[in-house]
Amino acid sequence: AHFRWQRDLKDPNTFVDFLVSTSKPTMRLSSSIYYPKYRFGAFGTLFPLNMANRACPEDYGVMGLRYGSKNLSLYANYL
């Protein structure tokens, strides 16, 4: 099952996603927020039920920051 909440339908950059799978037991929570006025945003993904198969740092979750303008978009991840 996949659930997505957006603050505004015209703003796809600010959302919360919740994904649950029973075929491969996993649960994922993703969130992103972006402020166009400041051209700054943050995002994150957590894997709370993927405990048996955690082999690398990305399996625990990813967080990051984002900067965006008309001509340039940069982001940095933190594992």
Image (cartoon, rainbow, N blue to C red):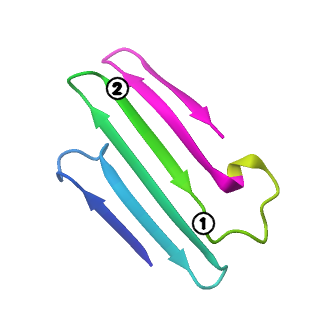
Direction top: furthest residue: 71
User: CB of mark 2 within 8 Å of CB of mark 1?
Assistant: no
Mark carried by residue 48:
1
Residue 59: which quarter of the image? bottom right
Quadrant, the C terminus? top right
Nearer-the-camera pick, 12 or 30: 30
Left or right, residue 35 beside residue 54: left
Q: Main secondary structure of the magenta part?
A: strand
Q: Residue at x 28, y 47 (%)?
A: 12
Mark 2 is on which residue type? Answer: Phe
Q: Which residues are magenta?
A: 59-79
**Looking at the image, is mark 2 or mark 1 earlier in the sequence?**
2
Residue 41: which quarter of the image? top left
Mark carried by residue 40:
2
Query: Whole-percent x and y of residue 70?
Result: 30, 18
Q: Is residue 2 above or below residue 5?
A: below
Q: Residue at x 52, y 35 (%)?
A: 64
Q: Nearer the viewer, mark 2 or mark 1?
A: 1
Secondary structure category for the residue under label 2: strand
Direction right: furthest residue: 55
Q: Is residue 3 above or below residue 13?
A: below
Mark 1 is on which residue type? Answer: Pro
Left or right, residue 9 beside residue 26: left
